[in-house]
């Protein structure tokens, strides 16, 4: 089975609501094609290991995807067979279908590299569930003891520094989602002074959010800039009632290191701050590892790859937070993932496979 065939097979398996079938395929393929120690945990993560050593290298991906468009489901237009299989099409040197870019193409390349290489140290293949819903699988695996020293995460790093180049991302932003709730005392609007207006308290909190300075960090010659954005607001019960409650949400893009001092909103009387989601940022702290992957990436392509940063959170954030040194290297291009015409370049898939092989074959450095 070629890399393209393996990618097509993986992409065709629905995995936006239930990753079981995709996990079944991965587990069966690894048991058939390798002599690795293959495990499947209780939530569906598939992990395979071979070789021994103190500094394990993991090739990491995920087999869940976001919900496909009707055009990406075979038989959807005819109203039959919906959900049985995703549509996959090859044209103009690309594979089209839900999950081709994010990230079953990279997963297929990691599978083949894992199969083909006989490393001197320990090599790990890991595919997690639930990446698209907050890193459920990665967090579970980490809690269960998954702790490789190094990892290459196959999320997108292609066309960041220029066209037709697959770069090595050494840092990315995280995301913290918060709800700010202001509480007051209801009263009839004709006697507004008898109440305490929660909307007024909420607007004071919005002003405080706008006044906060998000942190900056310089990585690989780039500046990663945090950002705070008020995204939703809700409050009040009637036009003639002083509102007793008003809440708004904040989307915060975080950077490695400091966080914006969002907790200061809770200093306002009647205002509470709740963190709803906190996807950690990532930064590789091992320059030698990043350079080793960059050297392999350079050897696998005619272009001149660079060390770059990404704006999006990935499972690399959870691994990095747990102590794994991570880089990101994969075929997806900016703006390609989650789209109705999602696709991946076949040439870039082959490039990623060759890079994974080169790093793994020389692991650990001799």
Image (cartoon, rainbow, N blue to C red):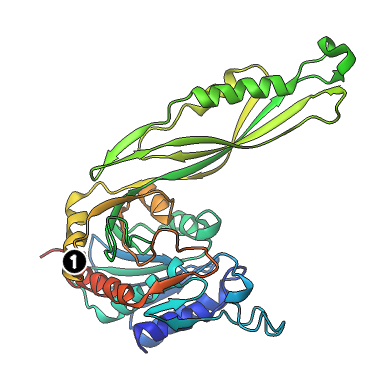
**Would you say 320 lies left or right of 73 here?**
left
Q: Nearer the viewer, residue 248 or 130?
A: 248
Q: Position of residue 2 (x, y in %)?
A: 35, 87
**Would you say 241 lies left or right of 20 here?**
right
Q: Spot the residue most to the bottom.
A: 1
Q: Spot the residue most to the left.
A: 366
Q: Nearer the viewer, residue 275 or 175?
A: 175
Image quadrant holding the N terminus, namely bottom left
In terms of image quadrants, where is residue 238?
A: top right
Is residue 31 in view? no
Q: Position of residue 308 (x, y in %)?
A: 28, 51
Residue indicated by mark 1: 296
Residue at 50% x, 81% y is 88
Image quadrant holding the C terminus, namely bottom left
In terms of image quadrants, where is residue 354?
A: bottom left
Q: Position of residue 12 (x, y in %)?
A: 52, 81
The number of callouts visible is 1
Say few, some or many: other residues with alpha carbon within 10 Å of mark 1 (under 14 / 14 to 19 / 20 or more): many
Q: Position of residue 41 (x, y in %)?
A: 50, 68
**Would you say 232 lies left or right of 237 here?**
left
Kind of element beneath mark 1:
helix
In terms of image quadrants, where is residue 146?
A: bottom left
Q: Spot the residue most to the top.
A: 193
Height in image: 145 above or below 181?
below
Residue at 49% x, 57% y is 140
Q: Nearer the viewer, residue 17 or 20?
A: 17
Height in image: 197 above or below 8?
above
Residue at 85% x, 27% y is 239
């Amino acid at each position: 089975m070629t890399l393209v065939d393996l990618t097509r097979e993986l992409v065709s398996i629905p995995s936006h609501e239930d990753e079981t079938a995709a996990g079944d395929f991965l587990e069966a393929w690894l048991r058939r094609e390798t002599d690795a120690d293959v495990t499947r945990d209780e939530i569906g993560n598939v992990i395979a290991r071979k070789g021994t050593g103190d500094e394990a290298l993991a090739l990491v991906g995920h087999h869940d995807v976001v919900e496909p468009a009707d055009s990406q489901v075979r038989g959807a237009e005819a109203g039959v067979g919906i959900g049985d299989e995703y549509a996959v099409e090859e044209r103009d040197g690309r594979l089209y279908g839900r999950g081709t870019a994010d990230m079953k193409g990279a997963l297929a390349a990691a599978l083949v590299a894992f199969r083909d290489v006989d490393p001197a140290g320990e090599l790990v293949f890991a595919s997690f569930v639930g990446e698209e819903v907050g890193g459920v699988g990665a967090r579970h695996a980490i809690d269960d003891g998954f702790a490789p020293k190094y990892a290459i995460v196959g999320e997108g790093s292609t066309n960041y520094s220029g066209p037709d180049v697959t770069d090595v991302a050494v840092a990315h932003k995280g995301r913290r989602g918060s709800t700010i709730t202001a509480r007051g005392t209801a009263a009839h609007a004709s006697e507004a002074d008898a109440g305490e207006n929660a909307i007024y308290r909420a607007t004071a909190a919005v002003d405080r959010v706008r006044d906060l300075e998000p942190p900056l960090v310089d990585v690989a010659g780039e500046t990663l800039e945090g950002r705070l954005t008020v995204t939703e607001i809700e409050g009040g019960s009637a036009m003639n009632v002083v509102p007793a409650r008003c809440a708004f949400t904040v989307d915060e893009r975080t950077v490695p290191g400091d966080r914006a001092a969002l907790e200061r909103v809770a200093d306002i009387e009647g205002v509470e701050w709740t963190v709803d989601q906190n996807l950690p940022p990532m930064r590789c702290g091992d320059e030698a590892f990043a350079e080793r992957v960059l050297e392999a990436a350079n050897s696998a392509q005619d272009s001149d790859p660079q060390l770059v940063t990404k704006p999006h959170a990935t499972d690399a954030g959870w691994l990095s937070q747990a102590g794994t040194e991570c880089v990101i290297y994969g075929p997806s291009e900016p703006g390609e993932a989650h789209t109705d015409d999602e696709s991946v370049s076949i040439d870039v898939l082959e490039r990623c496979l060759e890079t994974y092989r080169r790093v793994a074959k020389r692991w650990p450095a001799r």
